[in-house]
Structures are given as structure tokens and as C-alpha cells.
Image (cartoon, helix red, strand yellow):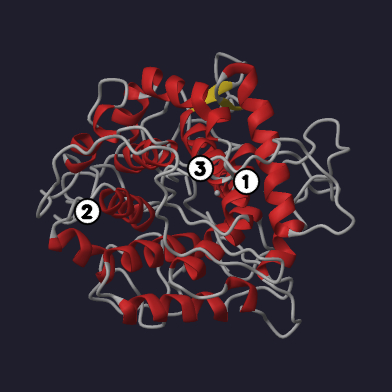
Amino acid sequence: MPVRRSAAALTAASAVLCVAAVPAATAAPTPSPTPSPSAALPAGLYGTKDPAYDGVWRQSLALLAQDAVETVPAERAVGWLTGQQCQNGGFASYRADVSEPCDAKTVLDTNATAAAVQALHALGGHRDAVDKGLGWLESVQNEDGGWSYNPGTPSDANSTSVVIGAFAAAGARPGEVRPDSGKSPFDALVTFALPCSDASGGGAFAYQPDEAGKLLANGDATAAAVLAGLGRGMVVSGTEPDGSPATCQTPAKSTAEQSARNGAAYLAETLAKTGHLDSPPMPGADDPAPQPDFGNTADAVVALSAAGHGDKADRSARWLAENSAAWAQQAGPAAYAQLILAAHAHGDDPRDFGGADLVRQLNATGPEPVSTTAAPAPKTKGDAGEEGKGGDSAGIWWMVGAGVAAGAGIGILLSGRRKHKQP
């Protein structure tokens, strides 16, 4: 989920920022590294920027978005993704030389693995790869029931959410995936939810507790956790309003579903102010003001649509249609994919989004698809059809995280979630 967001990028971003200076998803993007002529990119990969931190993530989002709009990707594009998988089922963020087997030095990435699992399941015909990916994810689950960006570190809301989504999208029950402690992924998810009484962000989710143990509202983490708590996948199809109020409520016992609905209320209230989410300025930026965050806003549109509050996302969808073109062009395939998924979820036509054909623009960033469909009529809000729904013991199931630390910056570099420390 990163473009896209990533508070997962928080750690990632910090690491990158401390060493060099920059990373992920919003206005005034900073160009991400471009490969040198001697480091030619593989023909099946989407995008032309350095894939070191987001290759598998951006490829997976591109394939998911294409599938959502009935575009059949090139075989070499799918083959590039399957070729990135390690023998144990996990994926690194990017492997430049897949002829070399993965070993103990290969830094595996739960976010990349979970996204790849969702994409390969959606495309069909890759059950073995999907099952191996799920098996690896289960093997690196933390005792609190959640997941971290790279195995061996504390769980975070974004990683936990995208992994929940991988299990649900593949037809498994995330609530039944438990380590020796017996805790479920949904047990971990609710620990990142801020109470309704929190004055600065009641109902929101934090990426992780800060050093003092305090939970700080994070739009990126909230959008991801809303989907996970509601049992939805990355691909949401024009959902119907469910009539529930977009207000934060405190039940006698917290459940992942109620926490998700509280998160949706937080997103609705936040988006009502300007129509978009913001990210803090990059360190050293000339302008100290927060910057519009296109990737996280797109994810919020998906989350609100999944929660039955698509009407609360109307202004944000219009804002994206009117303002996201330059960001998407600079950021590349994952950005186009995020916008396609937002338009698709909200019931808009991705082929005429603010006058732009997002599908054509995404297709142009990679190998020519096998086929595309004629532009379909926009879906209505009641024209749902999402697969992979499910639930935990409270009747839930599924899914999808440097939001706080980054701007649009390396933007796609993390696509919201790249580079990290080794386990």
C-alpha cells in the first residue's frame, strides 16, 4: 500500500533520510533514482525508475489495477513478478539477479510478498506461488498476531493490514492465522487504533506507538486498517452505502470491524476539511507547510467506499481527478494504479478521470498488454462484486502502508513502503 503510503515508510524513510536525505507519496514530488545506463531494467517491469525499494510492490499494484479494469497484462510482466519469488515463498522488495538463489542475506519484505500474493491470485493460474507466499507470511507472523515490514521487528498497522488482505483475497481466513500465542491478526490490528476520546485523532490508526508508547493518528495507516478491519481487499468495486453513521463510537468491546468503522469516520472528518490528506514537509524543504498527499488520499477514497461512505469521498475523488496528473506522471505505475483503484472503488470511470485515461497511462509504463477492453460505463455505487470477503471471529476478514515521514518524494520509491533495515 505506498505514492501509496507508508508509514511503513516511516522506518524506511528514516533509514533512507538519515543516510542520504529523502522518501514517499504526495505533492511536489522529489524524483526517485533513475538507473544508470549500465543497469538496464528488465523488459517486463513497469516504470523506469530504480526498482530497488519498490519493484515488486509497484509491479503488483499495476497488475492488480489492470485486472480490475479487465486489462490482460503481458506474459512477461507477470513472469517478471513470479520470477522475483524466493524458494521459500517470500519476496524481497527487488532482486536484480534472480539467477542467484535467495539466502540468509536476502532481505525479505512482507508488504511486497502480500501485494504479490494479491496480484497473482487476482490474475489466476498461480495457486502454487500464492500458497507459498501465504506460507512464508504465516511463518514470519509476530506473537502479537501482526506483521512487521521486514521480519524480526515489531508489528505495524500497515504491514499487518496488507498481510491480512493477502490471506483474505486468496480465500483464506486471516482470523485463523495465529502464532503460538494464539493471537490473531485482528487482535494486533486493534492495538493501533486511537480511542474516540483522543482529541487529536479519535478513531484513527497509528503506524506504531512512538518511543513513549503514544499512538499518533496516521492517515496512511488508517486507510490501510479500515480495509483490513472491514474484510476488504485492495480492489473494491463501487460499494453501496450501508446506512451506518460516519461517527466514532466506543463499544463495550473493541472489534476490528468497529475500529475500522471508527477509522472511516476519522477519514471522513479529515477529508471534509480540504478534500485531501496531507503529509509533513520533507526535512530541509523550503516550504514548512504540510503538502497534499495524493497517494494516501486515493487510498482513503478506497477505504471510505469500502465502508459504505463513498459520498464522504466525493470531494476527494473530484480533487484527485483535478489535481493528480502531474504527481502520477512523475511517480509512475504505482501512482496510476492507486488512482485507478480509487476511481474503480468510488464508481468513477478510470478511463475518463478528470479527462485522463488512467488505464492507457498505466499501460504505457510497461510492456503492451495482451488485450484491453473497450471503455466500460462507470460502475454505480451499488454495482459491487468484490471477491475475497471474509471475517474474523467478529464477522470480519481482510486488508492493505512514509506517510508521516515522507512527502511525495522518492514517492514511488516506496510506493509507500520500501527500503528497510535487515532483520
In this orientation, which residue lies closer to the viewer: 372 or 88?
372
Apparent side of residue 184 relative to residue 3 in the rendered image (left or right): right
Q: Residue at (57%, 23%) from the top-left corner? A: 284
Residue 409 visible to the viewer: yes
Ranked by sequence position, the earlier of labels 1 and 3 is 1
Mark 3 surroundings within 10 Å by alpha-carbon count, few (fewer than 14), some (14 through 19), many (20 or more): some
Q: List x then y, in percent, for residue 128.
A: 33, 82
Q: List x then y, in percent, for residue 320.
A: 42, 24
Q: Name the residue beneath numbered marker 1.
A: 221
Mark nearest the camera among 1 and 3 is 3
Q: Name the residue beneath numbered marker 2.
A: 45
Q: Residue at (84%, 46%) from the top-left corner? A: 214
Q: CA distance from mark 2 to mark 3?
A: 35 Å
- Tell me if residue 150 comes above or below residue 382 in the rendering: below
In this orientation, which residue lies closer to the viewer: 36 or 133?
133
Q: Secondary structure at mark 1?
A: helix
Q: List x then y, in percent, for residue 373.
A: 14, 46
